[in-house]
């Protein structure tokens, strides 16, 4: 997934999340209105309480599902980024005993302005 694809997926999920929130708000308003009416009839009040619990369970299930989906998308994107990085990265150098190597000089000595920057064997 490219960065653009991820942002588009995130935007889609955000749009879906906002639509779910507005839908939940509508259901809460409807449930509250029905509860006000249900106070007049105990049977209707019980039915509304059950409906409210059912809607709450549906909302939490949908939220958990969306979170899992987002988590998998993020993991896939991170894996693709890691693969791309690893493909472009050089492998480590493996030296054997007895190989001649040049060591970069890290300690500067006075009077060595024109000296080589590597220490040779």
Image (tube, rainbow, N blue to C red):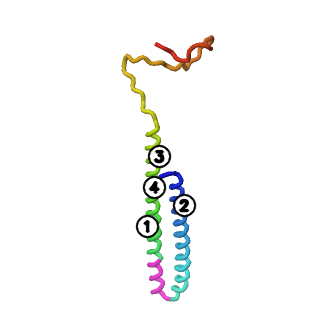
**Image quadrant in which you'd find residue 93:** top left
SS at mark 1 in the image:
helix
Contact check, label 1 and label 3, Cβ < 8 Å: no
Residue 81 is marked as 3
Residue at mark 4: 73
Number of the front mark, 2 or 1:
2
Mark 2 and mark 3: Cα distance apart in space: 20 Å
Question: Callout 1: 10 Å neighbours few (<14), some, many (20+)?
Answer: few
Q: Is residue 36 above or below residue 85?
A: below
Q: Between 49 and 30, which is closer to the camera in this rendering?
A: 30
Q: Earlier in the sequence, mark 3 or mark 4?
A: 4
Q: Earlier in the sequence, mark 4 or mark 1?
A: 1
Residue at mark 2: 11
Main secondary structure along the magenta-highlighted residues: helix
- Percent across and percent down for residue 9 are 50, 59
Span highlighted in magenta in the image: 41-51
Mark 4 and mark 1: Cα distance apart in space: 18 Å
Q: Earlier in the sequence, mark 1 or mark 3?
A: 1
Residue 96 is marked as none
Number of the front mark, 3 or 4:
3
Q: Is residue 29 above or below residue 44?
A: above
Q: Earlier in the sequence, mark 2 or mark 4?
A: 2
Mark 2 and mark 4: Cα distance apart in space: 13 Å
Residue that appears at 45% across and 55% down: 73
Magenta-colored stretch includes residue 45: yes
SS at mark 4 in the image:
helix
**Image quadrant in which you'd find residue 71:** bottom left
Residue that appears at 54% across and 56% down: 7
**Image quadrant in which you'd find residue 32:** bottom right
Mark 2 and mark 1: Cα distance apart in space: 21 Å
Q: Earlier in the sequence, mark 2 or mark 1?
A: 2
């Amino acid at each position: 997934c490219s960065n653009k694809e991820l942002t588009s997926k995130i935007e889609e999920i955000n749009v879906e999340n906002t639509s779910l929130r507005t839908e939940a708000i509508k259901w809460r308003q409807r449930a509250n209105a029905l509860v006000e009416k249900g106070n007049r009839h105990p049977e209707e009040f019980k039915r509304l309480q059950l409906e409210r619990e059912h809607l709450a369970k549906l909302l939490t299930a949908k939220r958990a599902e969306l979170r899992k989906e987002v988590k998998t998308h993020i993991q896939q994107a991170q894996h693709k980024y890691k693969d791309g990085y690893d493909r472009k990265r050089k492998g480590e150098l493996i030296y054997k005993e007895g190989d001649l190597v040049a060591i970069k000089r890290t300690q500067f000595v006075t009077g060595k302005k024109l000296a080589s920057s590597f220490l040779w064997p």
